[in-house]
Amino acid sequence: ALDGERPFADDSVEVLLESVEGKPRGGRKIDAGLRQVLRRGLALRPEDRHESLEVVLAAITALRERPGRRRRAVTMTVLGSVTVASLIYAFSGEPKPVESCEPAERLAALRDDDAWPAFDEAMAGRAEVVRRGLVRDAELACSRKDDARMQQVSGLHDRLVAVMRTGAENDHRAELLGEIARARGDRPLQLLSPATAEYIDSVVTPIETQWELEEWEVALDRGLDEVAETAIDRSELLLRRGRVRALRGDYDEAMADFRSARDVAMAQNDADRVIQAYLALAKLSIIRLGDFEFGKEWLDTIDPLLTGRGESWLSVRRTEALEIEAFLERNLEHPELALLRQLRAVSRRCWHLYRGESGRNELATSLVSLGNIYMDLEDYARSRLALEQARQLVQDDHEVTHAYALLLYVSDADEKEIRPLLEELLRAPDHDLHLITQALLLSLDADAENLEATRVGAERLEAMLDDASQPRTKQQEEEARELLRQARELLAQPDSPPDSNSPSIPTPTPTPTP
């Protein structure tokens, strides 16, 4: 009667009984609240119905009064939203026009700089997007008299100028522009002194752009000795120097720098630099030093700090922590768990790249880690796919090249395809892969039963192992010495090539990914 539909349209007795015993149907045209009241009143089981007719009438009366209340609630919500929006606008809203903003004017003048035409059409478009974003940041900082943000924008301006004037290839320029774009989204750290900020922008950043590690470290040494004026200055410079030392393979010195940077930042309540230091300590301990127990302690400290700072679950720093966790699980012989975490990390890196929060190098590094895990699982097809994608993202990256060469080796590729990659790595300076690259080359020569090349390779590997300045992890040293021992046994029988009972040369472990 209410809905205009016959409740039991079928003549079948079975259908009729099923309908009587089932829940009431229909009522789509009735108000949702009234439909709920009626359905409860028509419930099949008595215990599910209303307690009395008075309860039914009270429910219907409440429904009749509800539209007025709903309209008032909506009105109050709208008014409340308008009021809150007005307050936000009044106290922290759109920036008020300012007569003069020197950082914005400097950024605006970049288009007229003689170096701007050095960008080709593609790079000029990217640089213009970055420049406009920095202009907006500068104007906002000036209007709010935000000294920390103004210092950040000034530093990014100088980095943009350095990118303009560098003679780097387009891929490297694109990566540098991406780093500037990502830095725009970072919250400003505690202020550096003007002298240190100027020194970093004018001296350190140009050297960093050219990736001259030795000069980079010397500049940071000078900054710590002669320029730094505050504890915050020292914390920032120590973090930067620790990174350079880690890249050069000076792991103990890098660890000391990161610890000192953390201690100074904690004393100054500089939470963001504390988080940076803990991430660096965890990465160095787990990935480079192989100290998993100690590194796990650093790693466990990071999550509460990120949560306390209100860090998004998709933030770049959480992704970095996830990648370190994946590496740890892989080395604890939990490859399935490592794979799960690394797949999540790769998908997040793709998202960061899309949003401009992370660059091609970071995604390539994450893909190398994924390829290494697939290699452990002997899924060479997926490993090759991941590493080939990494090679497309970055050119001439040492980590990517070594991982790809190792994949070719374990998947029994042609020696002629592997050897040029390894020899290229051995010739390249400023990386910490020389020892494990020489170990892999020795394995290749021994497998080919090239005794003369094996003898030369063994001598080179032994010299590297005896050189205390040659960077290596504990695991890499153990594997290299075992490989060297077996190569010596092989060379002791030059007239009888090894048979199935002869010592076999072990396959080196995939390189750790930073």
Image (tube, helix red, strand yellow):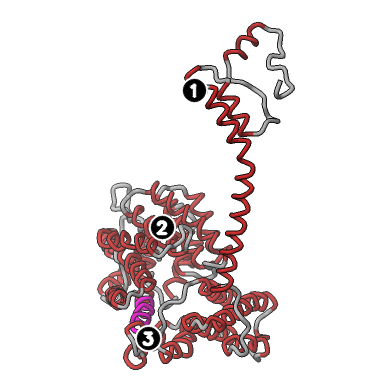
Q: Quadrant of the N terminus?
A: top right
Residue that sits furthest to the top in the current view: 13
Which disc, if any, is residue 322?
2
**Helix, strand or loop: magenta stretch:** helix
Under mark 3, the amino acid is: Leu
Real-space CA distance between mark 1 and mark 3, rounded to the nearest whole angstrom: 80 Å
For marks 1 and 2, the one nearer the N-term is 1
Left or right of 118? Residue 257 is left
Quarter holding residue 422: bottom left
Residue that sits furthest to the right in the current view: 4
Which disc, if any, is residue 268?
none
Question: As rendered, which of 224 and 2 lies closer to the eye?
Answer: 2
Under mark 2, the amino acid is: Leu
400 magenta-colored: no
Query: CB under 8 Å between callouts 1 and 2?
Result: no
Q: In this view, does 349 lie above or below 23?
A: below
The residue where tag 3 is placed is 220
Quarter holding residue 190: bottom left
Question: As rendered, which of 508 and 260 lies closer to the eye?
Answer: 260
Image coordinates of residue 303 in percent, x first then y, are 36, 60
Question: What residue is shown at x 61% (from left), y 40% (from top)?
Answer: 66
Real-space CA distance between mark 2 and mark 3, rounded to the nearest whole angstrom: 30 Å
Q: Please provide the residue range marked out in magenta.
A: 233-245
Mark 2, secondary structure of its residue: helix
For marks 2 and 3, the one nearer the N-term is 3
Under mark 1, the amino acid is: Glu
Query: Can you see residue 452?
Result: no
Camera-near label (1 vs 2) is 1
Left or right of 212? Residue 457 is left
Which disc, if any, is residue 51?
1
Image coordinates of residue 207 in percent, x first then y, are 46, 86
Q: In which quarter of the image is the C terminus?
A: bottom left
